[in-house]
Image: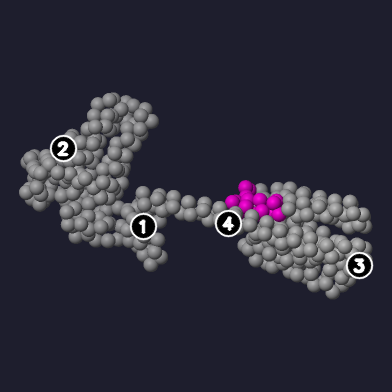
Amino acid sequence: MSCLVDHRASRPFNQTEVRRQRLVSRASYGAAAVSFGFSIVGAITGVPLSITIVSGLGGLCFTLVPLLGRVGPLASAICFVLVATAVVCGLTVLVGTSGGLLFYFFVMAAATPMIVGTERLSLPIAMVGICVASVCILHFTVAADTGRAPDWMQSGGFVVNAAAAGGLAVYVMSLGMKQIQRAEVALEDQYQRSETLLDNILPRSISERLKDPAHDEIADTYDDASILFADIVGFTAMSSHHSPSTVVHFLNELYLALDTLTDRYGLEKIKTTGDSYMVVSGVPVSRPDHLEVLARYALEMQEVCRRIAGPDGAPAHLRVGLACGPVVAGVVGSTKFFFDVWGDAVNVASRMESTGVADRIQVTDSVRDRLADRFVFEERGVVSVKGKGDQRTWFLLSARDGGRVS
């Protein structure tokens, strides 16, 4: 009884249970059609009333079986098998075993795992056991022909029951296979959506390693990489003077444009924190031109920002900082995890942004030295950098060739 009235009936059925309920309903209506068909034929041809009544009652019971799905996820499936067993046994006792009614037990045995499931393996085994035991008992205890049905019904019934049982088997199996195929398509769709979501959170190379059980911790050292921080000038005042929806709409428009630009340059966006946007080059895949590419990206980043109007209608302004050096990158956390980068170069790039000037790209002395032959710089002078003391910094103005990554 605990299988029929399940404690899980108080909560919504999951998709697997819903599919099984649907399969049981259709199988029940198919069995009801066969039972009512036999009952009608029996009434027309004048076979014994007991055979007609059993067939009719069986059809009625089959039509009621789907209603038991409200009791519990297994109630209708178990009752379907029990009703089918009772109907077939009753008719076999009345007409004999030579009428082909035993074929239906094999249909039930094949369908049972599909409608009951295999989570509780003992349950489908027990149901199949009932079918097998019923066949054996009826075969050895009931006569081949009881004499209650006319000869034409015995011989014709064998053919009809064989065909009907085969038809029911094909019908139920095809329904089950269609549901399995639909479930596989839905599962594949969910998998692709999960993969897309994961790719939006982590770099592809990192996500592939993270899915490998052998990589329980991901932390890589990069001898040389470039880091960029960008910050929206006046964002605090903007947030206080405009509605949250207006500010979010502006941020979304700006970050979508920057994300597109980041992808076009083949760079890696690390994170956005409020009005701060962080990008790295040369991580997680090392590249010899990481600094040059990031410098060109920074220049076009400013152009993109100027084309986007802020909540007040005026062009947005960015303060950008850029630095380079060794870093460590890895995945942090087990829930809401993210890919991050650490190192002195990261701290310096952040300081270049925070001490920078609106619409300018402030870089360190080392960045200027490495790019001086390909880019135009303007010396800013000595700037006090927290944790680093006084440092000479530069403003990146343009590329000498005026080129961009296409």
Tag 4 secondary structure: helix
**Mark 3 or mark 1, which is nearer the start of the sequence?**
3
Residue position marked by numbered label 4 in the rendering: 180
**In the image, residue 288 lies at what x, y percent?**
17, 57
Q: CA distance from mark 1 to mark 4?
A: 29 Å
Quadrant in which residue 124 is drawn: bottom right
Q: Residue at x 35, y 29 (%)?
A: 246
The label nearer to you, 3 versus 2, is 3
User: Viewer-proximal residue, 240 or 375?
Assistant: 375
**In the image, residue 245 lies at what x, y percent?**
38, 30
Residue position marked by numbered label 3 in the rendering: 146
Tag 1 secondary structure: helix
Q: What residue occupies the far bottom of the structure in this picture?
A: 140
Would residue 371 be found to the left or right of residue 221 on screen?
Answer: left
In magenta, the rendered stretch is 11-27
Amino acid at circle 1? Ser
Residue 381 shows in this picture = no
Q: CA distance from mark 1 to mark 3?
A: 70 Å
Report if the CB atoms under discs 1 and 2 are less than 8 Å apart.
no
Residue position marked by numbered label 2 in the rendering: 360
Quadrant in which residue 165 is drawn: bottom right
